[in-house]
Image (cartoon, coloured by chain):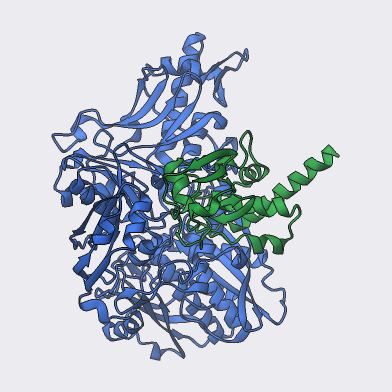
Chain colours: A blue, B green
């Protein structure tokens, strides 16, 4: 399927050009779908303003700006008059019928997945504008060039703006683009442009869904059962109902679901009022007696022993190489270690919220910050029992997504309440709600064993993962050469709290255990940690290397090895790895490859001050292929470091008697200014390749690097993710 | 009856619950949504406003307590042009998700209003607002840039 076949140009009623995706009717499976579903891509107004329509959700990672830069570059637009618009998800938009699609945002995948289409769109629009200008000058298109929103007649220098040409350009057939702009001519891509949100943010006028009001709207909040599976036994809301701003108080049923990104809702007591403060004040005036249910005896610290008991090394492996059942005892030297992580919450600065208008019980309109307008709509349609094409989602900029906003629980809640009270409802989660009713980073245990040969090289490597995360663990391939490999993964499903996506997801913990363990191997081999990693990356991998996560893993390995070697050398240089530090300073290294395409090597300096380990510096050498916007990529690296650092210093959340212990930032602290290290970052592009994602890859290396630095400093090996503070 | 100044204009309230936190009055009665709800307990700084020029959380500050005071929100920080801090924030491209940033700017504005040349330690002490996106190093750079911009401007004047 060629992208260009589905590009269509149309004239706007206001004058101007709209370039869209347009699926032919034959492609549409569902008969009730409209015949001309469009996917707006680029709009050019008669005043020359360019609007890039954004499918991807914007949560601070800068995807919207990056995507706009790609299109604007090929279009040769004037960046200073380029704007973004987030698209609403409704039945008229292309690909609406699909349960998964362009609207869903996660996995550091936005720039990668939008790259080709947005280039084509920009280049197509540019070609149409040139054709239009050339026709008006009665000349050949080869005599024309473009520059910042103008088509220029090269021989004479006369020019016409995109604004002037836009309406006529709509009548030009969309051309086939045979080549794109060469990189060395880039005017926009590669420049450190600011995010297009910044100017509105600093004035306090950028709106999040919490800031929106819809006519006729009431506000709601929910007191949920503290223990998963708990229910209301009885409640007394008499005092609360006397408050003038309170409209209704009633119990909501729990809903169990076991789908990816939909784990149902807890139910609880719904409070509906005229305003947020009315609802929040009512919460304190209500008495509830809970039937907490069977999980009320559960504690998270018991889970580790339960994972041990659940461990089955004979589980069918997910990665194998060489002789996967080779015992490590056949090797000259044996090293084993176990690594653990706690449940971790998200702490999104904007607590979850959504406005839902489901007043008639048939048509649903939602305003919210969500990572998954498209996928959530599937769940809403099935659970609410309405046709999908009666649902419209208006995405908003998010005050943090980080994986939590991929889940649709808060959308279901808001919709149910709106239907019940027959009014649009803004559902507000308090900070306490956001902490206690999360979908958490998993509690997980990694069991590593390795047999080394006489020279300290890896012969046989085994990893067993037992995790509360449904997707398991041990998905990252090994660039480190080895003779025999076995990776198993087990999902411990009796989780006492729901699992979820947490920035870095599976690679976060895969890198955590791997990069400490490789350091332990380096130590056992008596080698420098960077030199050892490089030496092992230089060693071959078996021909029969198999991974269920990647059928082409063998083809990927040479690239993975080569990139990691180059980045380890780069970070060693950047950090002056071989320069001795003071006696109370230790250096640690870690390297990771997120989705085998985004590479990050970090060296950290940890200082022992009294009895406290302080992270002082982080050196990062990173390669994400072509960098669309170095300002945004650097921002993501710094952001990822702080994100990954947070549980290292402050741990995660704990579960006692079935409930989350923590409730606000006094007991679930997050990293602040005073804990922020100095960060020195260098971006590389060792091989010409299309852009790879930057949203998560820098998260995965910080914790193991810190553990390794502590070991270098003090000989103490920290193997639990919460290792400081 | 409560009377206070809000972004330079006089506000008289007589039919309002005086225990309502200032945050919700600003957001719901005045549509000043730049001041954000982050935690409701004065722990995160997203709700930071100025009371008589000093950065204060508004999420647990009752309306009754601002009687006779001057309240400034992010919208009123600089009404005709960008405050130097806002210019510095733009120059450094500080925000990512942006939700905490109005509160960050308000805290920084208090710092610079009372300390024209803050040291690294001064910045660390004052800037306790949470940023989940971790923009702290750029916040620090923007504050130093704003301090430089202000001192250069006053050098030019003198």
State the image coordinates of residue A286 (x, y, percent, origin top left).
Answer: 28, 64
Of the 4 image quadrants, the one containing the N terminus of chain A is top left
Residue with the most extreme front position: B1
**Measuring 46% from the left and 68% from the top, which residue is drawn there?**
A479
Depth check: give the residue in front, B27 or A175.
B27
For the C terminus of chain A, give its image quadrant: bottom right
Does any portion of residue A315 appear in the rendered image? Answer: no
Is residue A334 shown above or below A195?
below
B103 and A499: which is toward the camera: B103
Q: Quadrant of residue A390?
A: top left
Closer-to-camera residue (A176/A40): A40
Q: Position of residue A456 (x, y in %)?
A: 52, 84
At 72% from the left edge and 79% from the top edge, which residue is drawn?
A582
In this rendering, position of residue B151 left or right of residue A231: right
Image quarter of residue A207: top left
Q: Position of residue A554 (x, y in %)?
A: 38, 64
Position of A109 relative to A468 (above/below): above
Q: Name the side, left or right, on which A668 lies relative to A255.
A: right
């Amino acid at each position: 399927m060629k992208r260009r076949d589905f590009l269509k140009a149309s004239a706007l009623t206001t004058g101007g050009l709209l370039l869209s995706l347009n699926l032919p009717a034959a492609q549409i499976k569902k008969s009730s779908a409209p015949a001309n579903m469009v996917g707006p891509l680029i709009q050019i107004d008669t005043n020359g303003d360019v609007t890039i329509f954004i499918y991807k959700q914007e949560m601070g990672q800068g995807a919207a700006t990056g995507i706009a830069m790609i299109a604007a570059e090929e279009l040769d637009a004037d960046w200073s008059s380029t704007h973004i618009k987030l698209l609403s998800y409704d039945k008229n938009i292309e690909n609406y019928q699909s349960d998964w699609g362009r609207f869903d945002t996660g996995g550091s995948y936005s720039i990668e997945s939008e790259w080709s289409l947005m280039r084509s769109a920009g280049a197509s629009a540019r070609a149409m504008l040139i054709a239009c200008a050339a026709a008006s000058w009665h000349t050949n298109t080869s005599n024309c060039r473009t520059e910042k929103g103008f088509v220029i007649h090269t021989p004479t220098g006369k020019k016409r703006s995109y604004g002037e040409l836009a309406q006529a350009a709509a009548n030009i057939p969309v051309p086939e683009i045979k080549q794109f702009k060469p990189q060395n001519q880039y005017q926009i891509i590669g420049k450190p442009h600011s995010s297009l949100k910044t100017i509105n943010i600093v004035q306090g006028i950028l709106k999040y869904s919490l800031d929106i009001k819809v006519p006729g709207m009431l506000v709601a909040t929910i007191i949920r059962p503290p223990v998963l599976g708990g229910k209301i036994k009885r409640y007394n809301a008499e005092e609360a109902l006397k408050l003038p701003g309170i409209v209704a108080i009633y119990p909501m049923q729990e809903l169990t679901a076991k789908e990816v990104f939909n784990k149902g809702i807890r139910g609880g007591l719904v409070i509906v009022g005229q305003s947020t403060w009315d609802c929040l004040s009512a919460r304190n005036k209500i008495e509830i007696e809970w039937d907490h249910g069977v999980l009320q005896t559960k504690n998270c610290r018991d889970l580790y022993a339960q994972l041990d008991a659940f461990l089955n090394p004979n589980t069918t492996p997910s990665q194998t190489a060489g002789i996967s059942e080779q015992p490590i005892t056949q090797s000259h030297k044996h090293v084993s270690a176990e690594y653990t992580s706690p449940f971790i919450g998200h702490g999104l600065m904007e607590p979850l919220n959504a406005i839902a208008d489901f007043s008639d019980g048939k048509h649903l309109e939602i305003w919210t910050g969500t990572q998954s307008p498209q996928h959530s709509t599937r769940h809403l349609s099935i659970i609410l029992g309405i046709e999908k094409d009666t649902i419209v989602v208006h995405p908003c900029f998010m005050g943090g997504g980080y994986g939590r906003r991929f889940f649709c629980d808060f959308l279901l809640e808001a919709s149910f309440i709106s239907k019940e009270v027959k009014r649009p409802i803004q559902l507000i989660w308090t900070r306490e709600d956001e902490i206690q009713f999360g979908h958490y980073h998993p509690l997980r245990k990694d069991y590593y064993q390795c047999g080394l040969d006489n020279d300290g090289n890896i012969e046989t490597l085994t990893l067993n993962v037992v995790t509360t995360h449904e997707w398991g663990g041990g998905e990252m391939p090994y660039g480190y050469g080895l003779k025999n490999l076995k990776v198993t993964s087990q999902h411990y499903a009796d989780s006492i709290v729901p699992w979820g996506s947490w920035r870095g997801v599976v690679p976060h913990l895969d890198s955590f255990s791997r990069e400490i363990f490789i350091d332990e191997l380096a130590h056992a081999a008596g080698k420098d940690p960077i030199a050892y990693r490089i030496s092992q990356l230089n060693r071959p991998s078996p021909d029969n290397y198999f991974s269920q996560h990647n059928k082409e893993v063998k083809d990927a390995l040479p690239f993975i090895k080569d990139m990691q070697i180059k980045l380890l050398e780069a970070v060693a240089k950047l950090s002056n790895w071989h320069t001795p530090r003071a006696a109370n300073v230790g250096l640690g290294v870690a390297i990771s490859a997120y989705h085998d395409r985004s590479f990050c090597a970090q060296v950290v300096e940890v200082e022992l001050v009294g009895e406290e380990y302080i992270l002082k510096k982080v050196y990062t050498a990173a390669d994400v292929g072509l960098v669309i916007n170095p300002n945004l990529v650097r921002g993501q690296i710094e952001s990822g470091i702080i994100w990954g650092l947070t549980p290292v210093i402050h741990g995660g959340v704990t579960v006692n008697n079935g409930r989350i212990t923590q409730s606000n930032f006094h007991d679930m602290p997050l990293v602040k200014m005073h804990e922020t290290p100095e960060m020195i970052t260098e971006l590389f592009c060792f091989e010409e390749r299309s852009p790879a994602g930057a949203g998560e890859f820098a998260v995965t290396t910080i914790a193991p690097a810190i553990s390794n630095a502590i070991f270098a400093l003090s000989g103490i090996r920290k193997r639990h993710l919460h290792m400081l503070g | 009856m409560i009377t206070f100044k809000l972004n330079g204009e006089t506000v008289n309230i007589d039919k309002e619950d005086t225990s309502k936190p200032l945050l919700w009055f600003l957001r719901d009665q005045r549509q000043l949504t730049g001041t954000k709800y982050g935690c409701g307990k004065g722990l995160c700084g997203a709700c930071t406003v100025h009371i008589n020029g000093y950065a204060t959380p508004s999420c647990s500050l009752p309306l009754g307590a601002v009687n006779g005071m001057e309240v400034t929100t992010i919208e009123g920080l600089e009404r005709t042009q960008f405050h130097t801090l806002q210019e510095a924030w733009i120059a450094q491209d500080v925000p990512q998700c942006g939700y905490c940033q109005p509160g960050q700017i308000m805290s920084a504005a208090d710092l610079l209003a009372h300390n024209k040349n803050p040291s690294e330690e001064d910045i660390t002490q004052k800037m306790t607002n949470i940023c989940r996106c971790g923009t702290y190093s750029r916040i620090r750079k923007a504050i130093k840039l704003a301090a430089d911009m202000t001192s250069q401007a006053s050098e030019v004047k003198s």
